[in-house]
Image: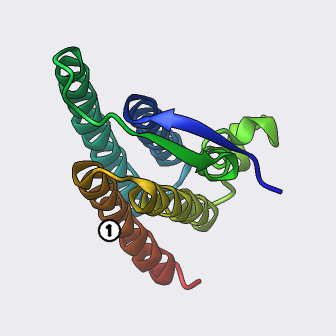
Amino acid sequence: MATSGTYDAQQLLATAITIEGESAANYLRAAKLVSSDSVRSVFEMLAKQEEAHKTYLTQVLESFKKARRGALGWPEMVEVPQELLDTARANLFPEARDPDPTTYINAVDAIRRGIQMEVDSIVLYKSLAGMAKDQSARNMFNTLALWEEDHLFILNYWLGLQGR
């Protein structure tokens, strides 16, 4: 039986900010390790986009905190299965499984890892959107899922170019 936790919008936003920041860091690490200049530029672009997502979410969180002081904002608590959060973060911290950052043997390995990170993020954000009672929260998490779907499309395209 899966465990779950109760989170408010502020906690969910903080988790999303962490995920976006770690995704950006992973793409930058991958960019430094792959030998393909074209794949490196894709990873650098994705890192910039993940940082932009993080900046956006940070602004949303700050607005939320201000609104909360005025008793506005999303009052709801959301019951989130812990496995959703754990899965979304699992691929961001591979050091627990493999401490060697050179495990990106080649561009294909790095792209596949990026694909898994994006898939996990999409599942998390779509699930959060589905659980949210507030329309603004649903819209925000659906938007995040769409952004990550764009990244997934890009990575799948580049995986295809690598002949895999």
Q: Position of residue 81 (x, y in %)?
A: 64, 50
In depth, the one of 158 and 81 nearer the eye is 81
In depth, the one of 89 and 40 nearer the eye is 89
Quarter holding residue 73: top left
Label 1: how many Cα within 10 Å (few below 14, some 14–19, many 20+): some
Q: Position of residue 164 (x, y in %)?
A: 59, 83
In depth, the one of 53 and 73 nearer the eye is 73
Which residue position is annotated with label 1? 150
Q: Position of residue 136 (x, y in %)?
A: 22, 50
Q: Is residue 26 above or below residue 112?
A: above
Q: Position of residue 31 (x, y in %)?
A: 46, 47
Quadrant assignment for the N terminus: bottom right
Residue found 38% across the figure and 29% down from its top: 10
- Asked which secondary structure carries label 1, the reply is helix
Residue found 52% across the figure and 63% down from its top: 123
Apparent side of residue 131 relative to residue 45 in the rendered image (left or right): right
Query: Three-letter amino acid code at disc 1?
Result: Asp
Quarter holding residue 51: top left
